[in-house]
Image (cartoon, rainbow, N blue to C red):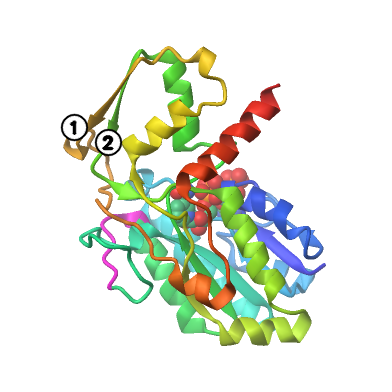
Amino acid sequence: MSILVFGGTGQIGFELVRELARIDDIVAPTRDEVDLTSPEAIRAAVEHFAPAVVVNAAGYTAVDSAETDESACAALNVEAPEVLAKSCRRRGACFIHFSTDYVFDGAKTAPYVESDATGPLNVYGKTKLAGERAIEAVGGAYLIFRTSWVYAGRGRNFPLTMLRLARELTELAVVDDQIGAPTSARAIASAVADVLGGLSDGDALRDAAESAAGIYHLSAAGHTTWYGFARAILADAPWPEQQVCRNLRAIATAEYPTTAPRPRYSVLDNSKVRERFGVQLPPWDEQWQTVSAELRLKRS
Ligand SMILES: NC(=O)c1ccc[n+]([C@@H]2O[C@H](COP(=O)([O-])OP(=O)(O)OC[C@H]3O[C@@H](n4cnc5c(N)ncnc54)[C@H](OP(=O)(O)O)[C@@H]3O)[C@@H](O)[C@H]2O)c1
């Protein structure tokens, strides 16, 4: 086998397994098969499968729970990536990892570039940043893709929650003062497959990845607020006939407090990934239309 994927049951991981299959053989052990909180299990898996590429799409992604569960969050977001990076370096494998827009504090009003100062506001963001730093310290052939506001046609995410609530409630209130770029897991996976496909095979792939090693922003083009996203979701809902929601209200974050604070602005500038690898994700609203159409098709 050639590509080892962790987190294959998650939003990005599930789509990655499908997309990467067009490049090479994939093996995607489940959490029961390889628990990433066990350094020994990670080392054994990388040795056993001897992959050319390891993709880590696993993570502790429950942003609010992380506030009171810091050690579990760090085990998955800091310690596991560090062990993965070391195992890859030892084996000469290329390591692909995902990070988040929540490494930023949101004080900017123009898209963040990779070299901008970080300043996470919550435990999740702090652990993701520490994970990035641990990987950078190991070095080697690593690519870290920071993405944002991820969703898919499956799993637990904002659009599927909105669609469910719009079937149950006549009025919905959604935060309109956090700005970001909703990004579909499929679009991320497709871009990562293009990046990997663009690099060559075997040792050359590792060399190419090592010379390109670093952090890359990879999110949908454009930006909106959670309210703007909710409007687009309901305007292009896969099953509009079931909607009872007639009033979608824009509210301030102060009216919907969460355990973990979020950045008010976390749009990512994608120039670096476009210039280095020639990949560019579609606008966020087009991505939603694609996912909505797939959901509709699945239902019919
Ligand atoms: N979601 C977002 O909005 C967002 C935004 C920016 C960046 N990211 C980053 O993108 C990556 C993927 O996010 P996602 O939303 O696709 O994740 P997700 O849907 O929450 O899936 C998480 C994955 O991690 C696996 N996992 C959890 N604990 C594990 C363990 N101890 N051992 C092995 N596997 C374990 C889960 O397996 P089970 O199915 O067994 O639980 C699942 O496959 C993460 O690094 C995340 O930080 C996400």
- Residue in the foreground of this view, choosing between 6 and 48: 6
Give the magenta range: 117-124
Q: Quadrant of residue 166?
A: top left
- Residue in the foreground of this view, choosing between 194 and 152: 194
Per the picture, the main secondary structure of the magenta-coloured stretch is loop
Q: Is residue 256 visible?
A: yes
Query: Residue 255's mark?
Result: 1
Q: Quadrant of residue 270?
A: bottom left
- Percent from the top left, x then y, of residue 200? 74, 79
Residue 92 shown left or right of residue 211 in the figure:
right
Which element carries disc 1, helix, strand or loop? helix
- Percent from the top left, x then y, of residue 204? 73, 86
Q: Quadrant of residue 38?
A: bottom right
Quadrant for the C terminus in the image: top right
- Percent from the top left, x then y, of residue 185? 57, 49
Check disc 1 and give the amino acid type. Glu
Which element carries disc 2, helix, strand or loop? strand
Q: Residue at x 39, y 65 (%)?
A: 269
Tags 1 and 2 in contact by the CB under 8 Å rule?
yes
